[in-house]
Image (cartoon, rainbow, N blue to C red):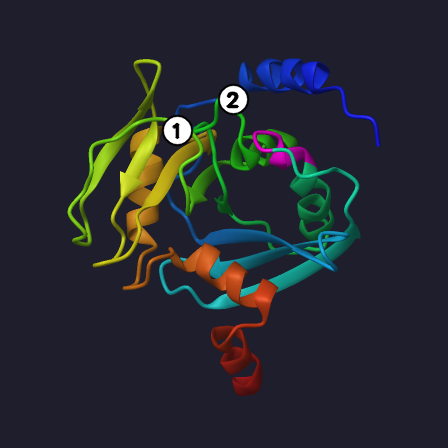
């Protein structure tokens, strides 16, 4: 597969200009979604999971998993092009569309300000938040490993997100606006979705569904 990185970089830059970093959604959230993407068959298959939960109780309303042939290679900084086709496929199955979507990955905390949360937010015209387990770019002051600690994530003298210690003695999360939400609200909503685990409930459930983890198995057996 021939990849024109210069063209993709230009596409990212053009899309990034369309990202809305203001609160453009109804804050009376009743449904909240989470997404997770993984790869199977040594990367040949892309697996995307979407879970819809009630808010604030976090009861599962519906969940979907889409598996598609992976058409785009692994290239750091361009992962959204590899991930979004399967996410769109899973999204098409969602009956109860959420008011807000937490995405496992970067929002604008990206060298060209277009991680998967921003890219997906634009494609769906949805308010999205990037919840990443690792830093892609930017700098921050070290945090005590105490839940609730936070510090700005900055790049080129611009705040691109937050570093959040979501649980004691764990690695921090990297939170950033995806689309149609401010940095302050992105951090606030992630905090509102924490229930004592490292991951906020929407992406924790999406990860459980995608990987058939005990949380999901327990839910299935209880039905």
Residue 79 in magenta stretch = yes
Q: Which mark is residue 3?
A: none
Which residue position is annotated with label 1?
23
**Side of 209 relative to 172 (left or right):** right
Residue displayed at 58% across by 66% down: 211
**Side of 44 relative to 194 (left or right):** right
Residue displayed at 62% across by 54% down: 38
Instruction: Find the residue positioned furthest to the right.
Output: 1
Which residue position is annotated with label 2?
19
Q: Nearer the viewer, residue 179 or 78?
A: 78
Question: Residue 157: horizontal and vertical position, in percent?
Answer: 30, 14
Question: Residue 2: horizontal and vertical position, in percent?
Answer: 83, 26
- Please identify the quadrant where the N terminus is shown: top right
Q: Compared with residue 138, is residue 120 higher up or lower down, i.e. above or below? A: below
As helix, strand or loop, the secondary structure at mark 2 comes to loop
Q: CA distance from mark 1 to mark 2?
A: 12 Å
Quarter location, residue 22? top left
Q: Nearer the viewer, residue 97 or 136?
A: 136
- Please identify the quadrant where the C terminus is shown: bottom right
């Amino acid at each position: 597969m021939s990849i024109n990185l210069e063209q993709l970089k230009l596409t990212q830059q053009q899309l990034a200009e369309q990202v809305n970093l203001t609160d453009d959604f109804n804050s009376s959230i009743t449904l909240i979604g989470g997404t997770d993407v993984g790869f199977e068959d040594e990367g040949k298959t892309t697996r995307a999971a979407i879970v819809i939960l009630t808010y604030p109780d976090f009861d599962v309303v519906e969940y979907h998993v889409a598996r598609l042939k992976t058409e785009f290679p692994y290239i750091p900084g361009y992962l959204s092009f590899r991930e979004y086709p399967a996410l769109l496929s899973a999204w098409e199955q969602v009956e109860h569309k959420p008011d807000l979507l937490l995405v496992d990955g970067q929002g604008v905390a990206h060298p060209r300000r277009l991680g998967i949360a921003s890219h997906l937010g634009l494609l769906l015209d949805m308010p999205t938040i990037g919840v990443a387990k690792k830093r892609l770019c930017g700098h921050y002051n070290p945090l005590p490993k105490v839940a609730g600690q936070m510090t700005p994530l900055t790049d080129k003298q611009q705040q691109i997100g937050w570093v959040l210690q979501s649980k004691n003695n764990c690695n921090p999360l990297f939170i950033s606006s995806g689309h149609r939400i401010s940095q302050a609200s992105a951090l606030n909503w992630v905090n509102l979705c924490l229930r004592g685990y490292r991951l906020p409930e929407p992406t924790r459930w999406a990860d459980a569904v995608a990987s058939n983890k005990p949380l999901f198995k327990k839910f299935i057996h209880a039905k």
